[in-house]
Image (cartoon, rainbow, N blue to C red):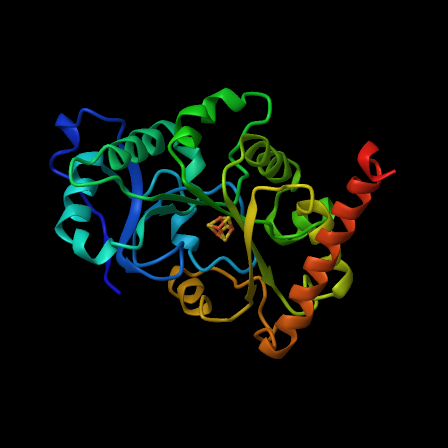
Amino acid sequence: MAQVVFTEDPRARESAYTLGRIHSIETMGTVDGPGIRFVVFTQGCPMRCAYCHNPDTWDVRAGAQVSVEHLIDLYESNRAFYKTGGITVSGGEPLLQPAFLADLFRAMHARPRGRVHTCLDSCGYAFDPAHPERFDAVLAETDLVLLDIKHSNPEGHRKLTGQSNERILAFGAHLAARGIKTVIRHVVVPGITDSVEECEALGRLIGPWLNVVGLEMLPYHTMGIPKYKQMGLEYPLAGVPPMDKERMPELRQAVLRGMKESRSKAGSHHPKSH
Ligand code: SF4
C-alpha cells in the first residue's frame, strides 16, 4: 500500500475540470471496492463518528486542491495493477464535492485506454433529499456505491456520529430508485451496534432496496487511537474493546433476517401473493 498526502498540485490553476479538495490517495487499495483500486480520500466531513479513523479528513479547509488531470496521470502510471479494480473516492465525505466527483468519474469512464470502474464510498450525509438533482451528474457516472449505515435508529445515530440518519436513509432510497449497485457497510461496536435487535433493524431498513448487492459487517478495532493522540483529540470510545470477530457471523445473519422479513412483508402486500 502506498499513501500519498497532497500538499500542492502545480497544475491545479490550468485545470479544465472542477478541482477537488483532497486529503490523500492510496495507490494500491484493497478494501474499498472490488480488485486493486486507486483510492482518493477527499477532505471534509460533516459527521463526527466516535470511531472515525481519519479525523484528519474532517476539516473542510485543510487538504490540497488537486486537479482531475493530476489524478488521471497518477492512475494511468499504475493502470496495469487496476485490471479488475478501478477508482474509488472515499473520505471524509466525497458527496460534499459533487461537481468534482462528476468530472473525475466522467473522465475515468471516457479514458481512451479503456473505461475505468468507478466507486463512491460515502456516509451519505451530504446528500440533500430536497435537491437530488445536484447529485444527478455524479450518480450517472457511478458504477458502485459503498454506503455506510452507522446506526439504524436516529437517536442512536446522533449519539454515535453527531448527526441523524435521515439523509443517509434518503440517499439509500434514492440509490435504490436509480438502481445503482450498492454495498451496505456497518461497523459493529461492542455495546453500541452489536445487538441482534440493532442488526435486525438495520436489515429491515435496507431490505426494500433491491439494488443492494453486498453487505460488509466491519468489526470495530482500535487502530485509529494513535491519530487522535497525535492530533491532541480525546478519543470518544476510550475503554471500548475491539469487537469479538467470532460474533460477526451471528450478527450478519441478524441483518439478513431483517432484510428477509421486510421483503416478505412487502411481498404480502403485493396483489400477486394473495
Ligand atoms: S463519516 Fe467517515 S470520515 Fe466522516 S466522521 Fe464518520 S467515519 Fe469519519
Q: Residue at x 59, y 21 (%)?
A: 130
Q: Is residue 67 visible?
A: no
Left or right of 202, for residue 226: left
The mark total stands at 0
Residue 63 image position (x, y, % from top left): 30, 44
Quadrant in the picture for the N terminus: bottom left
- Position of 248 relative to 155 (above/below): below
Residue 243 image position (x, y, % from top left): 59, 73
Q: Residue at x 40, y 61 (%)?
A: 31
- Position of 187 relative to 162 (above/below): below
Q: Residue at x 50, y 71 (%)?
A: 222
Q: Is residue 128 visible?
A: yes
Q: Nearer the viewer, residue 33 or 222?
A: 33
Q: Nearer the viewer, residue 152 or 211?
A: 211
Left or right of 74, for residue 53: right
Left or right of 227, for residue 158: right
Quadrant in the picture for the C terminus: top right
Left or right of 68, for residue 164: right
Q: Residue at x 70, y 46 (%)?
A: 205
Q: Nearer the viewer, residue 155 or 113?
A: 113
Residue 273 image position (x, y, % from top left): 83, 39
Residue 236 image position (x, y, % from top left): 57, 61
